[in-house]
Image: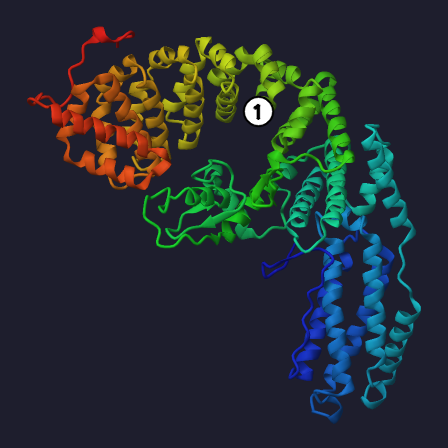
């Protein structure tokens, strides 16, 4: 996709030229032509990835035409008959104006950063377009009535010269372009057979198209990802033709990824974080002051791929809010406000910031729509054998670098592994099979200060991503569970400890692994330390709580979480937080899980948790998710605490109204729990023989297995 100065987008090799209006004055038309020609000539200093000689010749002729237009402009101070709107001169100039617009689009495409390899492989189409435009210039200029316009003889001669040259010069596919395209196709064939190509041949290709740095490869990968997404969204194309195009683009992406990983291995530190220096300064200011959690969808907690705004002004990922509304919810998830309209409006500004953030950090973030289902980058399998073969060769190369490389080589390999494992599940699978888990774990356990400073964070991020893979889970738990827990508690950087917490969450999805994690005496206390810590933000605390929730799926971990002080930590956190936020919902969800058991119930009640839960439930300005988990917590407290707990609810006149609100809205599936609570309150009132007189229930410790 090409983004113009006005912010609109167009596909490469498309030319949406606009005809000058019928009533345009000759002065305005000539000024516009001169301006257009000047814009085209600014590309003289740019690197053309294809048809270099042909473009040089074309730009030379455009430069000559500027002299002609400027001379005509001088002579139109006094209106003349031959410059009427329907005169041959004006019609000719209008045709040239359209041609110049198309030519400008073409040179933009052929010099665009990120599109260089793609344009190289489209050299034949570029030649065809350039040949047609050159012929049109010759035809239109030939129709210009030079003899009837009072121009100097040298200008007339210049017009004749340009006409002859454009007629004579036939743009054709250049020899160097043919050679480079042949080399690319040969290397793609080698990738299909998992054969390592000649690096000298690859360097020749990269030099020809102008890809010289690690950051250039990132731009190419992002562009190719956009093109793949656009191809899939193009419903006008026949499926067969679209598939062929997607396979080629996927192969080229595999080629560029291989180049970034194996050929252009020197990661310029500036490139890794600031390689989009051509972006708008305003966007850069936004990125510099950005918290990544600001780009997360409040529902899915993932980076938004298609941000949209709803009536309340809050932004969500389109798939998440569509699913929310489709489930019958007509409220804003963040505010609980009933929506008068469910229209979704694209948040262009946020999308641009997300796009630039991902480019800056080397993240390939592609949203692809297949039918009505959005397919994320994590689901994407390479569309061609060449891309698959390239990914497998890269995995072997990176693993070899980890095992045999010096510190600089290891740094590059770990940085690349982090990017690759973030990109897709297929890359994770390749790296696991190549044996990358063991050397990554050894790096994490290293006591070398240089390793901890330069490598540990990326290595832990790589392990986190590999923990999403089935076989990766097995290897990580088998070899490195103790190491991950040590990183959780003693990691050199805050980010490293958070990656460790997230890795434990993914590992805990397997029941046996959840049990083994819980048996490590430092794992749950380490997670609770993040939840309690003042140095961690809300997003970090939520990630740690997700890991704790994962561990609570294994019943043996219940008492361990209680022993780690989870109840007072969570209740204190709720009291210090805005009760309408997502973190409160996670705290309540964890407490509800703990309250499923009697010892968890007594811990919550004795710490004032019931009173706090009732207060939150009765509040009108909380998220629907907060109310759902609040209802779940109170229900568990009633089930384990009996009539004394129900009696507390009966005394609060606001509780019943809040429960009926949850029941009527059906929010997040909380209606069944709300219905159960309402039934318990009604039964209590029917059997009531007297008032208990206490605000908090009096529970006997003997009823509980693990007393506090």
* Residue that appears at 42% across and 45% down: 325
The answer to whether residue 51 of the structure is visible from this angle is: no
Residue closest to the far bottom: 81
Residue 501 shown left or right of residue 590 in the figure: right
Q: Find disc 1 in the rendering and name its residue.
A: 468
The location of residue 241, given as percent across then percent down, is 75, 49
Vertical relation: 56 (above or below) 437: below
Vertical relation: 570 (above or below) 250: above
Vertical relation: 242 (above or below) 584: below
Vertical relation: 162 (above or below) 624: below
* Residue 243 lies in quadrant: top right
The answer to whether residue 99 of the structure is visible from this angle is: yes
Question: How is the protein colored in the picture?
Answer: rainbow
* Residue that appears at 66% across and 21% down: 432
The location of residue 242, given as percent across then percent down, is 72, 48
Quarter of the picture containing the C terminus is: top left
The location of residue 117, given as percent across then percent down, is 77, 46
Could you say which is closer to the camera, residue 337 or residue 140?
337
* Residue 73 lies in quadrant: bottom right
Report crowding for label 1: few under 14, some 14 to 19, many 20 or more residues within 10 A (C-alpha).
Answer: some
The location of residue 511, given as percent across then percent down, is 49, 15
Residue 406 shown left or right of residue 501 in the figure: right
Could you say which is closer to the camera, residue 531 or residue 698?
698
Could you say which is closer to the camera, residue 612 or residue 110?
612
């Amino acid at each position: 996709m090409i983004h113009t100065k006005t912010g609109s987008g167009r596909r490469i090799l498309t030319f949406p030229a606009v005809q000058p209006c019928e009533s345009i004055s000759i002065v305005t038309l000539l000024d516009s032509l001169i301006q257009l020609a000047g814009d085209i000539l600014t590309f003289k200093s740019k690197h053309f990835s294809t048809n270099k000689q042909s473009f040089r010749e074309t730009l030379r002729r455009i430069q000559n035409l500027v002299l002609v237009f400027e001379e005509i402009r001088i002579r139109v101070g006094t209106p003349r008959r031959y410059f009427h709107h329907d005169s041959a001169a004006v019609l000719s100039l209008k045709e040239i104006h359209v041609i110049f617009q198309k030519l400008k689009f073409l040179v933009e495409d052929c010099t665009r950063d990120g599109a260089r390899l793609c344009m190289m492989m489209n050299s034949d189409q570029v030649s065809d377009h350039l040949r047609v435009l050159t012929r049109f210039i010759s035809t239109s200029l030939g129709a210009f009535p030079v003899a009837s316009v009072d121009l100097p003889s040298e200008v007339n001669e210049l017009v004749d010269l340009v006409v002859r040259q454009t007629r004579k010069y036939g743009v054709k596919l250049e020899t160097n372009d043919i050679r480079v395209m042949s080399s690319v196709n040969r290397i793609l064939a080698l990738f299909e057979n998992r054969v390592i190509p000649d690096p000298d041949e690859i360097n020749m290709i990269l030099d020809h198209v102008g890809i010289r740095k690690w950051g250039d490869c990132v731009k190419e990968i992002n562009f190719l990802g956009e093109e793949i997404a656009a191809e899939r969204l193009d419903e006008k194309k026949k499926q067969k033709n679209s598939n062929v195009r997607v396979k080629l683009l996927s192969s080229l992406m595999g080629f560029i990824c291989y180049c970034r990983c194996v050929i252009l291995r020197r990661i310029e530190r500036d490139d890794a974080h600031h390689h989009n220096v051509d972006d708008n300064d305003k966007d850069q200011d936004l990125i510099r002051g950005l918290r990544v959690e600001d780009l997360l969808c409040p529902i899915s907690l993932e980076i938004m791929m298609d941000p949209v705004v709803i009536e309340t002004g809050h932004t969500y990922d389109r798939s998440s809010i569509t699913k929310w509304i489709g489930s019958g919810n007509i409220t804003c998830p963040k505010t609980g406000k009933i929506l008068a309209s469910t229209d979704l409006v694209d948040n262009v500004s946020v999308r641009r910031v997300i796009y630039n953030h991902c480019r800056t950090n080397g993240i390939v973030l592609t949203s692809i729509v297949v039918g009505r289902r959005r397919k994320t980058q994590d689901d994407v399998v390479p569309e061609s054998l060449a891309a698959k073969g390239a990914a497998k060769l890269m995995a072997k190369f990176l693993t070899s670098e980890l095992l045999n490389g010096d510190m600089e080589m290891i740094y590059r390999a770990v940085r690349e592994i982090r990017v690759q494992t973030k990109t897709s599940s297929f890359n994770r699978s390749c790296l696991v099979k190549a044996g990358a888990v063991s050397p990554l774990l050894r790096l994490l356990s290293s006591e070398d200060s240089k390793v901890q400073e330069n490598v540990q964070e990326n290595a832990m991020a790589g392990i986190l991503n590999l923990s999403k893979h089935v076989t990766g889970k097995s290897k990580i738990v088998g070899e490195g569970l103790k190491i991950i827990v040590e990183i959780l508690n003693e990691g050199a950087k805050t980010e490293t400890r958070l990656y460790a917490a997230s890795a434990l969450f993914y590992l805990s999805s397997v029941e046996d692994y959840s049990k083994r994690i819980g048996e490590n005496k430092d794992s749950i206390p380490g997670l609770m330390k993040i939840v309690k810590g003042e140095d961690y933000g809300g997003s970090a605390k939520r990630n740690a709580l997700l890991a704790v929730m994962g561990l609570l799926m294994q019943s043996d971990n219940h008492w361990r979480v209680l022993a780690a002080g989870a109840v007072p930590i969570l209740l204190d956190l709720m009291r210090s937080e805005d009760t309408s936020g997502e973190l409160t919902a996670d705290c309540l969800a964890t407490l509800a899980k703990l309250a499923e058991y009697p010892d968890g119930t007594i811990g919550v009640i004795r710490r004032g948790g019931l009173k706090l839960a009732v207060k939150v439930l009765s509040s009108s300005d909380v998220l629907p998710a907060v109310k759902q988990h609040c209802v779940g917590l109170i229900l568990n407290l009633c089930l384990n605490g009996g009539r004394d707990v129900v009696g507390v609810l009966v005394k609060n006149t606001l509780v019943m109204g809040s429960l009926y609100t949850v029941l009527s809205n059906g929010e997040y599936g909380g209606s069944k729990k709300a219905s159960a609570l309402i039934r318990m309150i009604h039964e209590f009132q029917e059997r009531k023989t007297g008032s208990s007189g206490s605000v908090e229930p009096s529970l006997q410790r003997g009823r509980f297995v693990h007393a506090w």
